[in-house]
Each structure stands twice: as structure tokens, then as C-alpha cells.
Amino acid sequence: MPEAPDTQQQIDTAVQSLDAVIIGAGFAGLYMLYRLRGMGLSARIYETGTGVGGTWYWNRYPGAACDVESVLYSYSFSKELEQEWSWSERYARQPEILRYANHVTDRFDLRKDIRFKTRVVSAVFDETEARWLVTTNHGERISARYCIMATGCLSAPKQIDIPGLEQYRGETYFTAYWPHDGVDFTGKRVGVIGTGSSGIQSIPIIAEQAKHLTVFQRTPNYSIPARNGPMTDEQQNKVKANYAELRHRQYNDWIGLVGGIEPVPTKIGNALDATPEERQAEYEYRWNLGGLYLYTSYQDLFSNPEANETVAEFVRDKIREKVRDPAVAELLCPKDYPFGTKRLCADTNYYETYNRDSVTLVDIKTTPIEKFTTKGLTVAGKEYELDTIVFATGFDAMTGALFNIDIRGRGGVSLKDKWAAGPYTYLGLMTAGFPNMFITTGPGSPSVLYNMIIGNEMHVNWIADAIDYLAATNRRTIEPTVEAEKQWVDHVNAVGEDTLFVKTNSWYVGANIPGKPRVILPYLGGFEPYCKRCDEVVAKDYEGFVKA
């Protein structure tokens, strides 16, 4: 794939003028640039990395793959693109998704308007000019009418808060910032800290190479076999012939997991209305499908604890079947939170990996890691000597990347201060006091609980239409009213409180970051109702927004 040009030569420190600045060259940023260009506006993306792809640029750890079927996890805005691109596997892996992102970038000639190796350090709203002054780490300054935060929901890695890391003399790697040329674990004693999605995907592959692998687990996760495999020509052709129907089903679904190759029924009724035999058959069907389709079986799984326990125990029994050592199997069985209220994972031979003699599981919930040493780390007074430590420790989700930028709106108020008690948005798209600043798949939107590419497309289209509306009505700015924002946040919280998600210490509620306010971050009311609400707002002349 093409290397990013070195854009940091002879940076112009004079203030440049653009219609729009886009921060982030992931799937949201790329499509936002495409849309704005099509509207005749001048726009530029600023990207910290040396290439496009966002999440798929940074996360190159072994086994990194999408947990949504490839044919679903792809752009829908171009029918030609849908027809010309073919996926090699049912669940694309990171290299292929990155190739897809680069293909899109070059097919639509987007690269010339992307500044790579450039981090935006501040974005300040000028009330007199009604423009955003954006400053980069290279001293570049841009004045833009619109500022679009396409910074991603899982792009700010969690900081390590265990003492003594600086003393450790071995190799350290973070799944979120994996070396582009890979890592060879052959013959090494490796420790992996964390068993979320990146840990669950990478652990089986690291175990195949390492002399010995020690997994340090604080909280076990529910994981379902991905059952990945090659896409046949017949499957490809069938999908391409029916893409319009496939997209219709995606946009009219709660979570977007509608089946890529074959339709999968969603929300078929209540678990507790079914007989035990019917539930077992339904769960077996979805388990054998692979991927995340247990999410979309019964509609009461995330509101009724008793219903949730039926699927939770089903998965725990599957774990017990896979892991030979009963004590290890029980450590791997989640028991203190409802199924699916932490990010559900899809794996290839994750649980089977613990049957290897060369793999050890260490429980760090009852006895946390005490400290790092020069040779490794200690747990319960025991030192584990390690040549390499891999941190699969997660992210400061949904707000972390925004807070890494000094964003200031009206009156110099910082976004971080405004959101000190939790994020306040209207529709997850904008926040009061920050005119013409848009957020793609931000807090208060379905975001991480929906197909991210389609969700980002929907948001980009809404943003582009709002910008077009301002031009058509000779207005300079748009921002939510405080009242509309509060009503939306209250609605998001009320919907969340009716679910089991709020009962779990997960990054969905910010509980993985010490000191972060515990509030529900994504909107749990479903994608289809959310889209209808966004459409209603527009139909009522952008109800809840001030246009000036």
C-alpha cells in the first residue's frame, strides 16, 4: 500500500483557511472528506499516523480481526465500490481491512487532502468570526468554519497504573500500538495482561510461538467462536446481487447483525416465553453460526436478569466443555456480570489455548499485580519472570481521544470541563456551546453497539446535510440548545437504566478508567429508532438546535 507522504516539510505557520477540518483518517474521516468534497467545500484531514485506517492502522496485533462479517462491515455509499471489492474471508483480518481503507482512499483520490504524522493539539472557537482555529503539533494553524471530530471511540489506550514499569528490562508491547513489522515470540517467556477483545484474539497466536505464555486475567469475558473461513465466489456473487436488500436490513435493525451471507433472525421473542428445549436449540443454532449472533436472539436478554442467565449459563457450559482443567475452566467463566454487558468477543481457539501445557492462567482479580520488577512482575508475592510483556489493557473509550485535544467552545469553556460529570451531547452528534463542531459516533449515539462503518456513514450524511442546510438558509452556525441536550441525555440515561448494562463495570459506563464518571456512554435504544429520531429532528427544521 502507498506510504504517506512526509507532509511535515516546510509547514506554513500562517493561518490557513478551509471550510472544514476533519480530525482522524479512519472510516468516518475518509467518508466525511468524500462528502464535503462532493459539496464543493475545501476540507482536510489531520491524522496522527502515517496512513489511513484509524483503528485498523494502529491495531496490528496477532489475530486482529473484525467481529462483524466483512460484507456488512463495509461502505454502502458507493454501489460501484460494493461490486468491485471482494473479501477473502467471512471475518476480515486487520491487513485486509487496512487494504480496503487504502483502496477507498486511492479510488476516490482522498490522500492529497490528508496531512499524516500530524496531531491536532487544540481547537478553539472564535465567536467573532464564527470559525474554529485548529492548531497542530507542528505549529500549523487552520481557520475552519466546521470542525469534525472523527477521532474514534476506541483510540485512546488506557494508561498503565501499576508501579515499577520503568524498572522492567524486557520487551513491552501494546496491542493498541503494535509494531508495523510484527513481533517474533519464538522461544520467549511471554506475559499478556488483559483478556478483552484484543487479548482474546492475540493469545492463541502468541501461544503457538512462545516458549511459555502466562495470561494475567482480571475479569473473564464471554467469547463465541468466530467460525471464520474463506468467502467462496458463490457467496460473494450472492451478496453483491443482493446488497440493496442487505443494506436495507442493516439500517432497519437494532444492532446491525442481520447476517451477511444468509439472513439471521433478530429479536425473535422473549427467552422466558420459550421452553428450555427451544432456548437450547436457538442458542446452539447461533453458537454454531459463529460471531456475535447470540446478541440478537431473544429481546429480553438485556432487560431481564433471569432471561440473561439462560444464555450466560449456556456459554459457561461451552467453556467447561472446551477447557480440560475444571479449575481453569471456572476461572474463565464470567459469573459476576450479565452476558453481553461487557464487549462480547469472537475468537478462534481461545479457550482451547488453555489446554496447552505451555500456557498458564493467573487470576489477578483476587490478587492483583503488585508491581513490575526488572525481570517481570509479581502477583501474591510470586515473581513471574518474563522476556516480553504484552499489554491488552483496553481504552479510555468514547471520550479519551476527544480529551487528548484542548477543545474550547464559547467563552473559552473546555470540552473536558463541560463533560467533567459525563458527556453531554444532543443525539451524540453535537454539544451545546460548541457551534459547528460535530462528533461522529460520539457518546449518546448507538456508536460501539452498532456496525461502526454504517453508523459512521449515517452520521457523516447527517453532518453533511446539516452543513448544506446552513448554506441554503444563509446561516453561519448550528448548535444544540441546552434544553434539548439535557432532554436527550436524560433519555439516554433512562433507556440505559432499563437495561442490564448499567449493572456491569465496563468501559460502556467508563468504569475501566479510575476517576472517570460512571455514566452510560452509548445509546442503548437501538439504531433504527435512533435514525428515526435524527430524521424527525431534521424534518422539524432541526428541532432542538439554534441556527444563527
Image: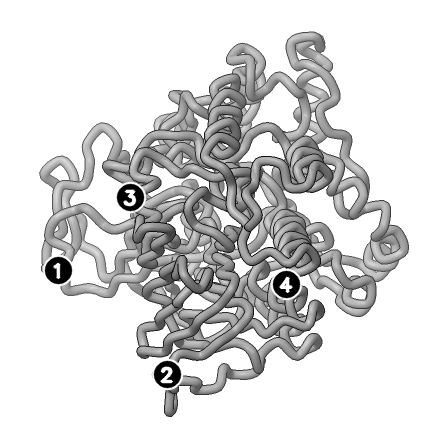
- Between disc 1 and disc 2, the foreground one is 2
Q: Which residue is mark 2?
A: 14
Vertical side of 414 occupied by 118: above or below: below
**79 relative to 153 in the view: left or right:** right
Amino acid type of the residue that numbered disc 4 sits on in the rendered structure: Tyr
- Residue at x 34% of width, y 40% of height: 419
Density class for disc 2 (Cα within 10 Å; few <14, some 14-19, many ≥20) is few
Name the kind of residue labelled 2 in the image: Ala
Which element type, helix, strand or loop, lies under badge 2?
loop
Q: Quadrant of the N terminus?
A: bottom right
Q: Secondary structure at mark 4?
A: helix
Foreground pick, 511 / 301? 511
Q: Where residue 104 sits: x, y (%)?
A: 67, 71
Circles 4 and 3, Cβ within 8 Å, touching? The answer is no
Q: Give, as a three-letter code, the residue at label 1.
A: Glu
Q: Which numbered disc, 3 or 1, marks the residue that appears first in the sequence?
A: 1
Q: Which mark is residue 417?
A: 3
Position of 242 with respect to 17 (left or right) is: right
Residues marked 4 and 1 touching at CB (< 8 Å)? no
Q: Nearer the viewer, residue 204 or 310?
A: 310
Count neighbours of disc 4 (C-alpha within 10 A) and say few if under 14, some if 14 to 19, many if 20 or more: many
- Name which of mark 2 and mark 4 comes first in the sequence: 2
Q: Mark 3 touching mark 2, by CB under 8 A?
A: no
Look at 23% across and 61% down and name the residue there: 387
Tell me the CA gap for discs 2 and 4.
Answer: 28 Å
| Residue under label 1 | 166
Identify the residue shown where x is 69% and y is 75%.
108
